[in-house]
Amino acid sequence: MNHHFARSAAPAIEITRLANGLTIVSERMPHIATATLGVWVGAGSRHEREVEHGLSHLIEHMAFKGTTRRTARQIAEDIENVGGEINAATSVEFTSYTARVLGEDIDVALDVLGDILTQSTFEEAELAREKSVILQEYASVQDTPDDLIFDAFIETAFADQPIGRPILGTPITIRSFDGGMIRTFLAREYLPERMVLAAAGAVEHERLVAAAERHFGSLRGSEGPPSDGEAARYTGGERRIPRKLEQANIVIGLPGCSFKHEDYYATHMFAQILGGGLTSRLWHEVREQRGLAYEIGAFHWPFSDTGLFGISAGTAGADLPELIDVTLRTSRAAVNDIAPGEVERAKTQLKVALLTALETPAGRIERNARQLLAWGRVIPSEEIVAKVEAVTVEEVRSAGRRLLSGRPTLAAIGPVRKVPPLEAIAEELAAVDGAISF
């Protein structure tokens, strides 16, 4: 039906695996003069032990703070002298180090990326400075209720587990880190067999592979199979943070599914129909019809072995009971009467999001690296579009039913006195098949 999306002369993807296990993937994009490249490591905050909470994020910060060959200033100069930029990011399951340069300067970027990933010194004075920066970042989140609420939410949904711990760490763990802890974590988790070097734009695969051999060939693989981190166990529960604020922020969540689960696309579409845009049910009912919230939305965060569905909103403390009541009833109604037109719109929105991400070299390298780490292959867009197209109305309703039957998680911050008890929310959700009346 809409498969013409995928047939636009897709650039060839080339993949090579080095002897040490590092995978290299390149995608040449004609008419683009720059090259975007990066190293994705299949290790993030969920791979940390309890005493290491926040270490992945600190390592990402320390990557640019000096190597055996370069000072922090020289790292910045070497990239910016060729007009490039360099960045890094930490998530629950991945850490990435990326750079963008002109096509002819790929060697410079790879030299710097290889240097920071194999020769960083983690010098004590730099470490002390960076810990101070992260402590300020931590304080900033504590001062920002609409950020803090999501940390409280995932921490409550996956209580006492690495996957639920906020990525930044805590002041106690951040202050405790030293160079030895960093080296131990890197030796255990930053293994070439769980790393992908991805490049897109003005790239030549053979040249990329030769440079990767030079700059990353020294990385040693693991003696045994790498750990996948602790398996996630959804717990649910509630966390209320009373604060004297003008507005209350609230997130109600339920167990979702992994991006490897057969219901993944149907679950994503249910979240989209319920709270994914200006035509979504929650936006229409809560924001447009009743003016109960400035912002409201639903989301689904998938991980490799689990997922988390949630509805987030901000409103005045006095409006919380009505907001929650309308939100829960709207969610229940959706399970029973999602219409074919809503599913078609959700499919189109999903395809546009997918294809928009692939319009930039940065989007392509992220897609290629993540899929190689998760699936061992790059999944063609046509295959994903076909899976999206195949989802039925009943599958979306059924995904919604499965979501709403889970044990809820509640996180609230601000004037939260009027938030109903968690058990009342659970009972309201449990009435999924009952009559819905507004």
Image (cartoon, rainbow, N blue to C red):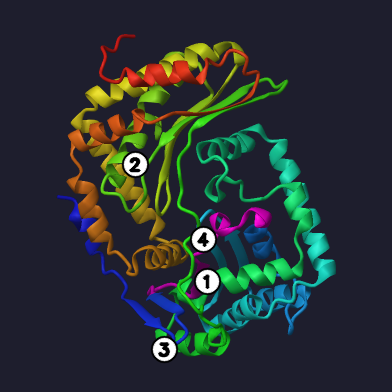
Badges 3 and 2: C-beta atoms under 8 Å apart? no
Q: CA distance from mark 1 to mark 3?
A: 17 Å
In magenta, the rendered stretch is: 28-54
| Cα–Cα gap, marks 1 and 2 | 28 Å
The residue at which mark 1 appears reads as 39
Q: Is residue 64 visible?
A: yes
Crowding near the residue tagged with mark 2, few <14, some 14–19, many ≥20 C-alpha atoms within 10 Å: many
117 lies left or right of 432: right
In the figure, 372 relative to 132: above or below?
A: below
Say whether residue 135 is left or right of residue 380: right
Residue highlighted by disc 3: 206
Location of residue 275 (image quadrant) = top left
Residue drawn where x is 32% and y is 43% of the image: 349
Tell me the tag on residue 268.
2
39 and 171: which one is in front? 171
Q: Nearer the viewer, mark 3 or mark 2?
A: 2
> The disc labelled 2 sits on which kind of residue?
His
Q: Position of residue 373 (x, y in %)?
A: 41, 66
Question: As rendered, which of 113 and 188 lies closer to the eye?
Answer: 188
Q: Quadrant of residue 200?
A: bottom left
Mark with earlier residue (2, 4):
4
